Image (tube, coloured by chain):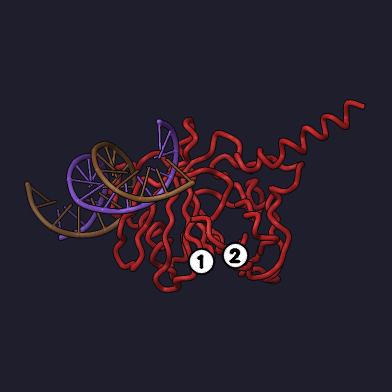
Chain colours: A red, B purple, C brown
Amino acid sequence: MEGQHPPPTTLLPPPPTSLPSLPPQISSPNFLFSPPSLPSSTSSSTLLMNNSPNPNQEIDWISLFSGQTGGITADEMTMNNSISCRSKTVLQNNSNNNNSEADGDHDQEDNQSNKRRAPGKTRKAARPRFAFQTRSADDILDDGYRWRKYGQKAVKNSAYPRSYYRCTHHTCNVKKQVQRLSKDTSIVVTTYEGIHNHPCEKLMETLTPLLRQMQFLSSF
DNA sequence: CGCTTTTGACCTGCGC
DNA sequence: GCGCAGGTCAAAAGCG
């Protein structure tokens, strides 16, 4: 599965997971995002704001995910921003469903289920949920967490099946769905649901030696 | 041997 | 109640 990764679209600094001052996860009350880590084979990543005045503007991850202006909330996903890691990624806008299929399925799914739901009936407890599109040859983008696939399902109006994954951490109940668009087969839509209650393993692996070294140096 | 993936069956919610 | 579609389960197979 860990094949060769295609070269990134453009070269830009990686998400701020690489900054020691940042926590491994950036969370808001109903939204959490762990910017995907980059595979070692990828030296850089792309962060693009599709609809911003400056399309190549670097994303302010902190404000984006901290609930401040321009931030993201789980089910709202009212953004047209694009984020890319090792490939071009588009955060999806639930309210703009001119892009159906995978994300459309999810978002429409939500919208439709909202429509279909009889008045007075409440939907399942809302969990933090967000989706984004990734232009990548790989279905699975390496976000630093370990996932176990627990299902795959053919989806209506889509040539590609939707895959269901669960975080393998025993106390963590985060799920994600992955689906490739049949309109544009280079785009993979990933939908995360839930909040990780544990640190990102890969990030910890990376940071632990650094922290040890810092502790060692600070002991003098 | 332990973990992951595959895949058909089953469950659930909704519209008709 | 029935059918449809999405989501989940769980046994079997695959893999390192």
> x%, y% of residue A95?
46, 62
- Residue at position x 72%, y 42% from top? A22
Q: Which one is in front in this view, the residue at disc 1 or the one at disc 2? A: 1
Q: Chain of mark 1?
A: A
Q: State the SS at label 2.
A: loop
The residue that disc 1 covers is A137
Residue at 65%, 54% (x, y): give it. A40
Q: Is residue C2 left or right of residue C8?
A: left
Looking at this view, is A104 or A19 the one in front? A19
Residue A106, located in which quarter of the rendered image? bottom left
> Which of the numbered marks, if any, corresponds to residue A87?
2
Of the numbered discs 1 and 2, the one sitting upstream in the chain is 2
State the image coordinates of residue A111 (x, y, percent, origin top left): 37, 56
Q: Is residue A200 above or below residue A130?
A: above
Q: Amino acid at mark 2?
A: Ser
Answer left or right for A40 relative to A209: left
Q: Residue furthest right?
A: A220
Q: Is residue C7 left or right of A61 when viewed as pictured?
A: left
> Taking the image as drawn, is residue A127 in sight?
no
Same chain, labels 1 and 2: yes
The reply to whether the C-beta atoms of the residues labelled 1 and 2 are less than 8 Å apart is yes
Q: Crowdedness of circle 1 by 10 Å Cα count: few (<14), some, many (20+)?
A: some
For badge 1, the amino acid type reads: Ala
